[in-house]
Each structure stands twice: as C-alpha cells, then as structure tokens.
Amino acid sequence: MSNNFEPLRADEVVSVNESFKILVNHPTFKTHELTDALITLLKNADAIFRAGKVEEKMKWFNEGVNVQVLRYGASGWQKGRIKISVEFCPDEPEGQKTSTPNQPETSAPESPLDEIRRMQG
C-alpha cells in the first residue's frame, strides 16, 4: 500500500465503515459535508470564530496559513503554509486494477457508485 494521498474535491463522495464515522452522522457523504462539520465544530468551540474573525480562521481550509515547520532530518525550521483538507490514498493506482478471476472483463466503465453500493449491501 502506498502513501500517495491526493486531495478530494468538495463534491466527491466518501463511504466509510459505520465504526469509523466522525463528525457526519451517516457513512456515505460528500467531502464538503465532512469539512463543513469540522468548521461547525470549530466555530462552536473557538472563541475567535464566535467573535467574528471567521475570515482569518477559514484560511486553514482555503489558501492555508503561514507557519514554520520543524521536520525530521531538516537542518532547522522551514517557513511555508499549512491547510486542512480531506485526502484519499487509493489501494491500487487506477490504471493497475486487476480483474477478479470469476468475472469477465468488460469494456463498459464501472460507475463509482457501484463500489459504494457493494460496500453498503
């Protein structure tokens, strides 16, 4: 398994096992539902959000905020930006999927929702 995480777009759909649900009350959701729930949680817990300084805090989810990071193996602090996003790491790269032995290969593309339906059923 690789660690090649890729950011998901806000309208892409995620399905998780019931035991891994967090912030969203259903196991299948669009990425923006998770980030919206996180923002709501932060707004309710953070006095600065409640004080009306929302634009500053929203940078964590948009363009990122200026930080300094001390990384393993680095010679010192590195300046840059950090942001919060939802990322996905596929088990297999899309072009390298192997066919199941008992299923014929078809040229018709599979719907991304078919995988979600199999997980739910």
Image (spheres, rainbow, N blue to C red):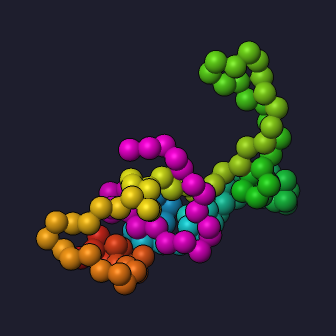
Asked if residue 3 shows in the view, the reply is yes
Q: Is residue 43 above or below residue 73?
A: below
Q: Is residue 58 magenta?
A: no
Quadrant for the N terminus, please. Answer: top left
Residue 90: x percent and y percent? 44, 55
Instruction: Residue 37: tell me if it is visible.
Output: no
Q: Is residue 12 left or right of residue 98?
A: right
The residue range painted magenta reads 1-21
Determine the residue located farthest toward the left in the rendered image: 102
Magenta portion: prevailing SS class: loop
Name the residue: 78% across, 42% down: 81
User: Which residue shows up at 58% across the image and 62% down it?
Assistant: 8
Q: Nearer the viewer, residue 85 or 113?
A: 113
Please name the residue shown 71% across and 49% down the image.
Answer: 83
Residue nearest the observer in this picture, 79 or 19: 79
Whole-percent x, y for residue 12 in the image: 54, 72
To which quarter of the image does residue 26 belong? Answer: bottom left
Quadrant in which residue 86 is drawn? bottom right
Horizontally, residue 86 falls left or right of residue 76, namely left
Which residue is outermost to the top? 75
User: In the image, what residue occupies the spot 56% across and 67% down?
Assistant: 31
Residue 27, compared with residue 20, is above or below; it is below
Q: Is residue 90 left or right of residue 7?
A: left
Query: Which quadrant of the figure has residue 36?
Result: bottom right
Q: Left or right of 119: which side holds 89? A: right
Circle count: 0
Image: 105 above or below 69: below
Q: Using the image as rendered, state which of residue 17 and residue 23 is in the foreground.
A: 17
Residue 17 lies within the magenta run: yes
Q: Position of residue 4 (x, y in %)?
A: 52, 47
Quadrant for the C terminus in the image = bottom left
